[in-house]
Amino acid sequence: MRRALAITAGEPAGVGPDLLIQIAQQSWPVPLVAIADPVLLQQRAAQLGLPLKLLPYHADSVSTSAGALYIHPIALRTTVTAGQLDPANAEYVLDTLRHAADGCLQGDYAAMITAPVHKGVINDAGISFSGHTEFLAEITGGSHPVMMLACAGLRVALATTHLPLHAVSSAITPDVLEKVIRILDKDLKTHFDLPAPRILVCGLNPHAGEGGHLGCEEIEVIEPTLARLREAGYHLSPPLPADTLFTPQHLDQADAVLAMYHDQGLPVLKHMAFGHAVNITLGLPIIRTSVDHGVAITLAGRGKADDGSLRAAIDQGMRMAK
């Protein structure tokens, strides 16, 4: 694979810049292009005591040598101190995402990999922002983004993403559920070489509603939608209790799990592989992978950030692009 991977540096006061500098300490078989402020990266590299050479990226660039990164410069709005959030740099963060996504749409990059951003500080700047998933769908024209985290032995996709818990039930409609399942099935086939994906589906309520005694969403919305899709050839379980679904006897028979909300499925996956899992956005016209963690403000600039998840995200992005 010759086309580059774009890597956004995320929140400049967090560990994103540290992670880019750390992964640059080894060679990579493809060009890795940091979408970031070069002064920020050089200053953080000096703070970490690590070598870093930033090279201009051009179309015929090949591989990435140890101690170096290709760079597409995006200027910070104000100076940064590691560990100190500043809303003034919110637009800088979004500019890095816009450039990487546009580059993927135009074919300049094979995929984009994102370091973590801080949703709160972006909203503090007066910008409505619920996360990478929704933002990238909006700027790339993705009709319905689906968030999926993956690690060795488990993939968990979400029917809803960044919603308060009280809003989840009303957000799970037959239309939404069908869109999510169709996208999940399609991208498992396209990007993971699974000709007939087997998907386990979580119920929304405890005990999957206990026959209607603990909630009716399974009876009224979830199972009728699943039944309709099974008739169309999809391999879907009935809605299963989430407290027993994540056991070997079930997972051994599945390629992915569909959880109804963020904290239903992701705690299990992160317990299995936190720091080495990958966040993948399905349903976009581009390939996007990301780390499985936040900005870790208290670790920024201290040389203690674990770059395992970013490495896994780069590896996953390369596999999907190929």
Image (cartoon, helix red, strand yellow):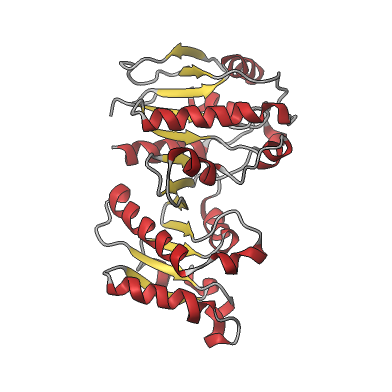
In this rendering, the answer to whether 178 lies above or below 86 is below
Q: Is residue 178 left or right of residue 322?
A: right
Q: Position of residue 59 (x, y in %)?
A: 33, 17
Q: Nearer the viewer, residue 307 or 135?
A: 135
In this rendering, the answer to whether 126 lies above or below 106 is below
Q: Position of residue 159 (x, y in %)?
A: 49, 61
At a point 35% along the width and 21% down the height, the residue shown is 63
Q: Position of residue 65 (x, y in %)?
A: 40, 18
In this rendering, the answer to whether 221 lies above or below 260 is below
Q: Is residue 18 visible?
A: no
On the image, which quarter does residue 226 sit in? bottom left
* Residue occupying the far left of the picture: 195
At a point 51% along the width and 75% down the height, the residue shown is 241
Q: Is residue 278 left or right of residue 303?
A: left
Location of the N terminus by quadrant is: top left
Q: Is residue 73 visible?
A: yes
On the image, which quarter does residue 302 sit in? top right
Location of the C terminus by quadrant is: top left
At a point 62% along the width and 57% down the height, the residue shown is 163
* Total labels drawn: 0
Q: Position of residue 216 (x, y in %)?
A: 55, 81
